[in-house]
Amino acid sequence: MNVLHGINGQDLAFNCPGCGCSHFFRISGQPIWSWNGSMDKPTVTPSIRVQGNILCHFFLMNGQFVFCNDCQHELAGKTIPMIPWDTGEVMENENAAPEKPQEDPAVEQAEAAQEATVAEQAEEAHDELVEVVCESCGAHYSKGDTACPNVSNH
């Protein structure tokens, strides 16, 4: 099942279990992330860093969030599978408490086996692009953009 959802022809959105809202990365235009083309097990570089009500910083590796230690939520430092985009709806409340993922011994074993490799790949990705949340309307856009794309509606 897809974990990504295309929006506006240049961004791909996904739901984040760490802060309980949707984030995106840009696949065309500027700035742009490198993406493996998979809608169900995406790998994206460089890291994605979102500064909204809380800081959320992570890598997307083979369909999993690899949350960095500087995250300001309970999943900091953890590796968690991405959430399927089954409803097509965006999680909107950044303050919503995320549901805890179900513990699965097989998933835990697979994560432990891949943890060293994922950590190495995460450290190799060095440039950080930042996603910004507009304080006026809540729209998400990249820090490289000079203004909110909805600025004419403010």
Image (cartoon, grey):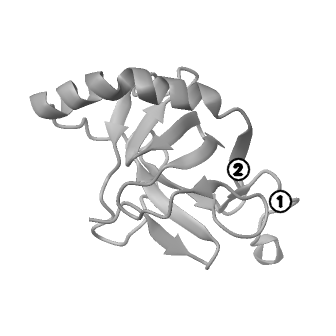
Asked where in the image residue 84 lies, by quadrant, the reply is bottom left
Going from N to C along the chain, the mark reached first, 2 or 1, is: 2
**In this view, the mark in front (2 or 1):** 1
Quadrant housing residue 101: top left
Query: From the viewer's perspective, is residue 50 above or below residue 34?
Result: above
The residue at 49%/49% (across/down) is 43
Front-lying residue, 100 or 60: 60
In the rendering, at what x and y percent does residue 38 appear? 43, 62
SS at badge 1: loop
| Secondary structure under the numbered disc 2 in the rendered image | strand
Q: Tell whether 132 sits left or right of 7.
A: right
Q: Quadrant of the C terminus?
A: bottom right
Q: Position of residue 150 (x, y in %)?
A: 75, 72
Residue at image mark 2: 132
Circle on res. 65: none
Residue 44 visible in image: yes
Residue wearing tag 1: 145
Quick check: can you spot residue 51?
Answer: no
Image side of residue 68 versus residue 42, left or right: right
Name which residue lies at 45% across and 22% down: 77
Distance, label 2 to label 1, CA atoms, is: 9 Å
Q: Which residue is nearer to you in this view: 119 or 95? A: 119
Report the residue at 55% width, 49% height from top: 44
Badge 2: residue crowd in 10 Å (few <14, some 14–19, many ≥20): many
Q: Amino acid at mark 1?
A: Asp
Whether label 2 touches label 1, CB < 8 Å? yes
Residue 114 at what x, y percent from top left?
A: 33, 28
Q: Position of residue 113 (x, y in %)?
A: 28, 24
Q: Residue at x 73, y 55 (%)?
A: 142
At label 2, the amino acid type is Val
